[in-house]
Image (cartoon, helix red, strand yellow):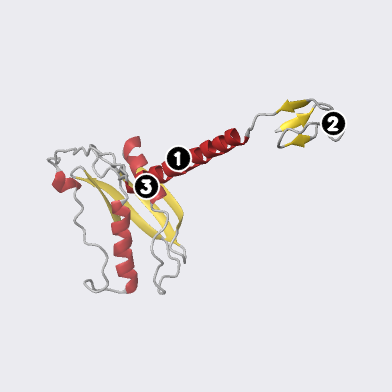
Amino acid sequence: MFRCTICQKLYNNKVPYCECGNDEFELLQDTEPEATQAKNTIDNLSVGIFSLCIILSLIIWFLPVKTHHKTAPTVEQTTVSQNIPTNIDKIWNDTPAYSSKSESGTPIELYKKSLENMLNSNLTPKTYNGDGNCRIEFTVADNGKLINRRMFKENGGDEFNNIVLNMLKNANEYRVPPHEYLGEKFTAKVTVQNGVIKLHLQ
């Protein structure tokens, strides 16, 4: 192509004179092949990138995935063995539990017996080296709570008296008393027999 050096008009073929009367023209190189080549290069690059994406997606799709399973920590268990004391017969309380079917008596008597068993079970420790005796008093409220608890020291050291006091603190509530109970005071004697503390409701 040719371009007029004055009016810049383009001509496909060289003419003797331009419409403006100029006879000098500038020869222009044909850039269409280069543009076409650049376009083809870009198209080829796009196809290559697209194909690469397809291949990568297929690899990821069929690639096996390893799953990591967390194992629970192992806990070591230790076994502690203890020797049975030689005076187990003295410590062991083999008094049968309260049962209205196996025992006979009035509801008050059965309740009193089970109450005595409960108080003996709260004596800790059950053994005592030495002499000791005291007396306790209490009443039972309608909801089974032990109220008006009192202790009368008679004979025994501080250790013995503390055992009985702790028993009264721990035995603060029991079963609801029977309807025949009218709030009478319960009295119990606590003594040491052959090194074992025993409580007897009177």
Asked if one can make out residue 160 in the rendered structure from this viewpoint, the answer is yes
Please tell me whether residue 179 is drawn above or below residue 54 in the rendered image.
below
Assess disc 2: are there few (<14), some (14-19) or many (≥20) residues with their C-alpha within 10 Å of its C-alpha.
Answer: few
The residue singled out by tag 2 in the image is 7
Q: Secondary structure at mark 2?
A: loop
Judged from the image, the secondary structure of the residue bearing numbered disc 3 is helix
Q: Secondary structure at mark 1?
A: helix
Above-or-below relation of 179 to 34: below
At x 16%, y 38%, the residue is 81
Instruction: Find residue 16 and report its horizontal and vertical position in percent.
Output: 78, 31
Q: Give amino acid for label 1.
A: Gly
On residue 58, the disc is 3
**In which quadrant of the rendered image does the N terminus lie?**
top right
Examine the rendering and report whether any part of residue 201 can be seen.
no
User: Mark 3 belongs to which amino acid?
Assistant: Leu
Residue 90 on image: x %, y %? 17, 46
Between disc 2 and disc 1, the foreground one is 2
Q: Nearer the viewer, mark 2 or mark 3?
A: 2
Whole-Å distance between the Cαs marked 2 and 1?
Answer: 46 Å
Sequence-wise, the earlier of marks 2 and 1 is: 2
Where, by quadrant of the figure, is residue 202 drawn?
bottom left
Give the quadrant of residue 112: bottom left
Instruction: Return the mark for residue 19.
Output: none
Which numbered disc, 2 or 3, marks the residue that appears first in the sequence? Answer: 2
Measured in 3D between alpha carbons, the distance from the residue under mark 2 to the one under mark 3, in whole angstroms, is 60 Å
Residue 159 image offset from top left, x and y in percent? 33, 36
Disc 1 crowd, CA 10 A, few/some/many (<14, 14-19, 20+): few
Q: Nearer the viewer, residue 78 or 91?
A: 78
Q: Which residue is mark 1?
A: 48
